[in-house]
Amino acid sequence: MVLHLFNTFFWSFFFAIGYISIYRRIEEGTIRWYRSKQTMLKFGELALVAYASTVEISLRILHHFLTTNMWTMVNLQTVVALYTCLTLRNKGANLLFLLVTLATFGSYGTLTWGLWLALIGLLLILFVVNQQSTWLVSRFSRYLGFVIPFGTFTWLLFKAFYAFSWWSLMVQLFCYVCVETIVFHYSTLLKNRGAASAKLIYETMHDKLTGVQNWAKFNQDFQLYHELMLSTQINEIVLVAIDIDHFKQINDTYGHLAGNAVLTNFAHNLQTYIHEVNSEWEVYRAGGEEFNVIMAGIDQPSAQQAMQAYCQQLRDLHITYGGTVIDITISVGITKLLGNDVQAEDTIKRADQYLYQAKQAGRDAIIAGY
């Protein structure tokens, strides 16, 4: 029994650490691969389900050929099932994984109707866990308060499959709770590190004053779009260059803090409008009072219409600072990425040229061309 306990704890511990590490790598990789969060939820999590399902099925095969004992296998499968259901965000993906779990767990021994109902009840618990995962993992006491009865129910279910002693059940349940404790703290450690890393990346890629993405992120994204355009993965990419009219005069008249208020309010207003038109488009602060917008999947005339509508809307934006109302207008240059643009800078320079023409035309104007 001591050997069984050591074997279960030893392999469960290292398996859990490895499973979570690979799971997180797949999750991070799919987030980077899919730019859209909705696309990530719909398709990216299928990779996580495929990974988790493969592990569960592999454990069942290993146990069938007696290369993994039953004690270790049950703990490993239970760890996989609970952790996966706690992390999946798409209901369809979670349901698919639960069906795989049902098939895997249901392949043990001869199941009576009572055992089938108990197994389905176990999966219903996991389904609810998926819906309440944020609340459940927010505190270790909550997590532990769930793990103990959940593990007890699971091991009672497997005790019905195999006639092992109550003492064996208590020993394995203790081992399971220990492993789940390690899983919680290790997962929390990875989550905190990921949050710190995400915060650092966010601060590196976003303008501190306005909150929109900065010039470094613009260069990175536009280079990516440039490559996609040349590889014909995206048909149309439009670049919009924007400059707040008479911004120096605003600073000289009302002060730099008023200028900061203008920049912040304008950036928020522009970004809100752009995301309402297309959530995939982004706003970037190029520097000073200059901003850029990358519009993918739209032709240039449609982009020009969208910016004309925004300029009209901008007239309703009244920025108040120190009791003074400041109204602003913008000059806009629009161009599209051409197939003969060897460098991304070729498109950027062309957009800036049209922006300069808009300013020369008296400002509060839009000039487009290519």
Image: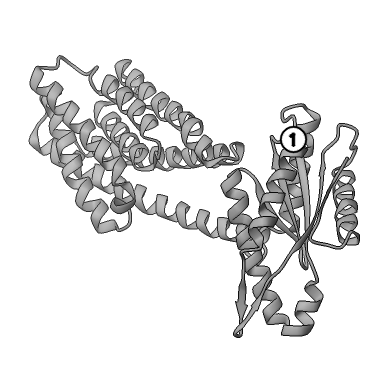
Residue at x 29%, y 29% (from the top left corner): 73
Image position of 298 (left or right of 5): right
Q: Out of 266 and 33, give the one closest to the viewer.
A: 266
Which coloring applies here?
A: one colour
Which residue is identified by label 1?
Answer: 299
Q: Position of residue 242 (x, y in %)?
A: 77, 57
Q: Position of residue 265 (x, y in %)?
A: 62, 68
User: Residue flagged by tag 1: what amino acid is it?
Assistant: Asp
Quadrant in the picture for the C terminus:
top right
Q: Is there any visible trace of residue 162 in the rendered image?
A: no
Image position of 83 (left or right of 344): left
Q: Position of residue 206 (x, y in %)?
A: 65, 60
Residue at x 79%, y 83% (from the top left corner): 252
Find residue 7 and report its image quarter.
top left
Image position of 28 (left or right of 117): right
Secondary structure under tag 1 reads loop
Q: Position of residue 197 (x, y in %)?
A: 57, 57
Find residue 124 and report its image quarter.
top left
Q: How many marks?
A: 1
Identify whether 251 is placed above or below 148. below
Quadrant in the picture for the N terminus:
top left
Q: Out of 282 and 120, give the one closest to the viewer.
A: 282
Identify whether 55 is placed above or below 79. above
Near mark 1 (Cα within 10 A), the count class, few <14, some 14-19 or many ≥20, is some
Residue at x 32%, y 34% (from the top left corner): 81
Q: Is there any visible trace of residue 187 in the rendered image?
A: yes
Find residue 315 and report its image quarter.
bottom right
Q: Out of 19 and 251, give the one closest to the viewer.
A: 251
